[in-house]
Amino acid sequence: MNVKERYTSAIDSLFQYTKPLRLRWFRMINFIPKRIRIVTGVLAMTTLMLMSTFFSFSSSWFIFFIIIVCASFFVTYVGIFEGISGIEWVMLFVMPVFLSLALYFAFSLIPVRWLTRIPFLFLFALLFYAVLLTSNIFNIGVERSLQLYRAAFSINYLLQTIIVFAFTIVIASLRVGFLLNGFLLFVVIFFLTFQLIWSVKPSDTNDHSLYLYGLLAGIVMAELFIALSFIPIKINIAALVVSAVFYSLGGVLYHHYNERLFKNIIREYIFVLCFVIVIAFLTIQW
């Protein structure tokens, strides 16, 4: 028996040994209604966020970074549970993880007191519940012609814009240099655009064209963020500009991938973008 055969035999033995445990786990999870699992997951993540506010951000952020990533992944897995395969192991978890991290880091910029904790926790619970519902809809494979899918896609798109706004403020507040600013935003935009375009036609197969859309959006947004680093503009206004550009660019890429990119659609996104840019231009302090 060669090395490959021994390795395959060991894997098969491991799966056979753990099969009873996996069957009991599946039965236990499926016994609990999905709605209850999602609500329980939201309460668990909200409790975790509440706990994080009692620790000094400067000394504990990395620990909570790891905990929040793992917890949001596990909560999402238990919440939607059935039928996850292939690229869905990434796409269905991008939004819960990024939303949790964006709000955690954004809250670190706000004075910590009960007057800010309560609205923050309420907002987080509401948004995290919405993102779990959208991930569940994408997972069960609702037809794109149904109103349920359209609502889920719109909510997902809106939440991505909020995440970009929050991350932009956080990254700009770090003051780590324009190159690192651009790189950090590139990472965020790449994953969000990847997930956005994937949600147009949710599937468990890996479409390599999605990487090109993610790279294109990431590079454009990173270059924009670097350029804004040299303009005397307030951080929140810069975040608004970045969010507007992401909204417009993501919309154009989405319609292009969906083969429905018409002139009137392009005009609508250009109008939104120009409106925000004019507002930003009026706030520049030369």
Image: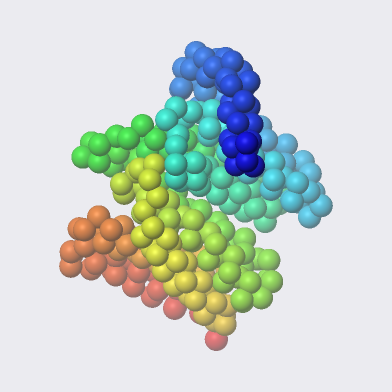
Residue 167 or 3: which is nearer the viewer?
3
Q: Position of residue 33 (x, y in %)?
A: 46, 17
Q: Residue furthest front?
A: 1
Q: Position of residue 70 (x, y in %)?
A: 64, 40
Q: Is residue 281 above or below residue 153?
A: below
Q: Position of residue 4 (x, y in %)?
A: 60, 42
Residue 193 or 242: which is nearer the viewer?
193
Quadrant location, the C terminus:
bottom right
Q: How is the image coloured?
A: rainbow
Measuring 40% from the left and 73% from the top, which residue is drawn there? 277
Q: Is residue 176 above or below residue 165?
A: below
Q: Residue furthest bottom?
A: 286
For the image shown, how many numbered marks are present on the structure? Answer: 0
Measuring 67% from the left and 56% from the top, which residue is drawn there? 109
**In the image: residue 136, left or right of residue 43:** left
Q: Is residue 24 above or below residue 3?
A: above
**In the image: residue 56, left or right of residue 232:** right
**In the image: residue 181, left or right of residue 91:** right
Q: Is residue 237 visible?
A: no
Quadrant location, the N terminus:
top right
Measuring 42% from the left and 57% from the top, which residue is drawn there? 193
Residue 62 or 9: which is nearer the viewer?
9
